[in-house]
Amino acid sequence: MSLVAHAFSQSGLLAKILKGYSPRQAQIDMAVEVDLAIENKASLIVEAGTGTGKTFAYLIPSLLSEKKIIVSTGTKNLQEQLFHKDIPLIRKAMATNAQIALLKGRANYLCIYRLELYVKERGQLDAAMLADFVNVRKWANSTTSGDIGELVNVAEDSGIFPYVTSTVDNCLAKDCPHFDDCYLINARKKAIDADVVVVNHHLFFADMALKDTGFGELIPKADVVIFDEAHQIPDIASEYFGEAFSTRQILDLCSDVIQQFHTELTDVKQLGKAAEKCQKTAQEFRLLFNHDPERGNWREKINLPRFNQAFKNLKTDLDFLYQVIKLCLSRNEAIDNCFERAVNILSKYEIMANVEQNGMSFWYETTRRHVVLHLTPLSVAEKFSDYIKDSNAGWVFTSATLAVNGGFEHFSDQLGLTQATTLLVDSPFDYINQSQLIVPRYLPAANHPQRAQALANIAMPLIEASQGACFFLFTSYRMLNQVAEILSEHIQNPLLVQGQMSKRKILDEFIARDSAVLLATASFWEGVDVRGDKLTCVIIDKLPFASPDDPMLQARSEDVRRQGGDPFSEIQLPQAVIALKQGVGRLIRDVTDQGVMVICDDRLVTRPYGQVFLKSLPDMRRSRNIEKASHFLATLTSNNLTIEKE
């Protein structure tokens, strides 16, 4: 028996650290394949169903290899769990001295220079931000890591953080007076020296694409690279191999220039005027777009006269600001940094003005306050596969949702992983007895005016039967808000609606309140783990096909068509299957969990492609009868009440 296989045996490593441990063949199979990939410096793609124990299946062979390991995750929550809980547990059992480091993106670390800068600017802050600022300053005196995750008394979405953290643009790097004490630099040094480094996908690809100045030395040193939640990688990789031009960058630059004018360079009046003019033009450019956040085709927008003119006005004012900053060069480090940022923004402007490049998608997205223009490559397969070939490392890609209809082509083709070994490991859960899948009959079409009412009518008896403990997941904010409004008038349960509070707070509230119902969109379809009778019903409003207006989808579809392919079966269907698998994965998280999954979309049973979805989902008992589902939920609820009384 190999060292790895023995670790998962009845008398092995896991048995020592996990009470009541019994070996699982699926977990052993995965661990053995991971070990082979590490040993042969090969690539492995593994779909490991919920409950397989995939974290230990990749961590144990990695740590036993005694090589330099990078584990990249999709969420901060999983990053924290690996660093604070899972890896220390195995490390202790193995009695190894392997050094572990947690590395986050720069926005997670306090910037001492910017904190000092804004001590002078407190007059600009409103009362809530001022209170947060006081808490940050107090914490800054005692922290050793500078990780803002330690700040329990400041909300994670507080507006204060951009004031006290740096961006790639405004970091002074070696010119910073606090360079030797920089928390970010110190975290990176630890990561370079560590045996195991836990990062997230965004940070990994920023490093790989050398998008973060002075930080390209970590990944080339790795012998083993493991991606958990790997289904997110193709989109994130595309984003980092492209370019982005944002009004946020312009407004941040203008804000810093104005600050320099008020404090250090009061003699250069043109500085303040040029920055204020550019600020105004950037804000006017945002106002041309719809008020609500949206995505669209930048190639089409720039050809409309008013957008074209506003974009040219932006260039004129950026040029003027650049010229004025140039006059102040060498006065101090901060203004020199502003000059470099102006040069960088102007070069990105030119990229977004030249929309005729082939093989690229030019698209925009808006937030409430900003516009971001993107240039994204339609494929990263060649670039990524070349990188893997040159790395001389073992690569493992794993997630609970990678396969479509039992195959991995959709995932492997996107990343050029044609030589990778693949493994599909089923969940150990007994879905047939633990769950039901309901596809309700007679629903109005997706765009029908009565659709929201029909969805609410389906949800109400289920919510009553489960006494809350229900997730209602939507594919759009519009439908979410319509259904939330109807439910608020008809049920007494507390409704927790995404957008009304931060994700962490809404989840904490859901777990704390017995009869709560949570209504949410995309970000709650994955990375959310609620176990036991706290969640017994998940309702999904429709199959999560990407909007046909999505500019990246349009560009990729056109590319597939040109090559004689079918965009629906090659892009839209696989993407929707993986997204649905993520949503369905919220329901059963443990061997004792039970519940009902309701997918309010007739196409699952009326269209031929419905079979592709059903074959990709766990094998649940299926029905079209809502009353059956309500009865099953009511039985679960009464059983739980009996257990509690006993």
Image (cartoon, grey):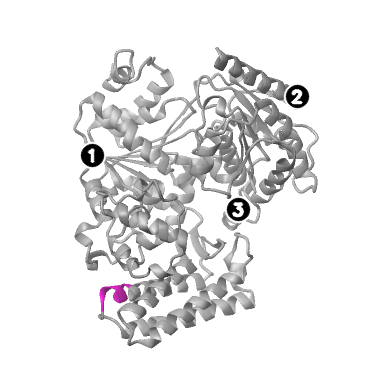
Q: Nearer the viewer, mark 2 or mark 3?
A: 2
Q: How many marks?
A: 3
> What is the three-letter code of the residue carrying label 2?
Glu
| Badge 1 element | loop
**530 w.r.t. 77: above or below:** above
Q: Which residue is mark 3?
A: 557
Which residue is denoted by mark 1 in the rendering? 195
Mark 1 or 2: in front is: 2
Left or right of residue 15: residue 312:
right
Which SS class for mark 3? helix
Q: Which mark is residue 604?
A: none
Q: Which is nearer the N-term, disc 1 or disc 2?
A: 1
Cβ atoms under marks 1 and 2 closer than 8 Å: no
Disc 3 marks which amino acid? Answer: Ser
Q: Earlier in the sequence, mark 2 or mark 3?
A: 3
Closer to the camera in the image, 26 or 421: 26
Q: CA distance from mark 1 to mark 3?
A: 42 Å
Magenta stretch encompasses residue 115: no
Q: Which residues are magenta?
A: 332-337
Identify which residue, 212 or 502, lies in the foreground. 502
Of residues 469 and 11, the one drawn nearer to the viewer in this rendering:
469
Tell me where residue 27 appears, x and y as whole percent.
40, 23
Q: Which residue, given by chain and number where applicable, does mark 2 sit on?
A: 627
What crowding class fits label 2: few (fewer than 14 Cα within 10 Å), some (14-19), or many (20 or more)?
A: few
Q: Nearer the viewer, mark 1 or mark 3?
A: 1
Q: Residue at x 36, y 54 (%)?
A: 135
**Image quarter for residue 175?**
bottom left
Residue 343, image x, y percentages: 37, 75
In the image, taking residue 311 as reference, residue 153 lies left or right, namely left
Disc 2 is placed on an element classified as: helix
Q: Is residue 328 above or below residue 53?
A: below
Point 29% across, 27% down: residue: 90
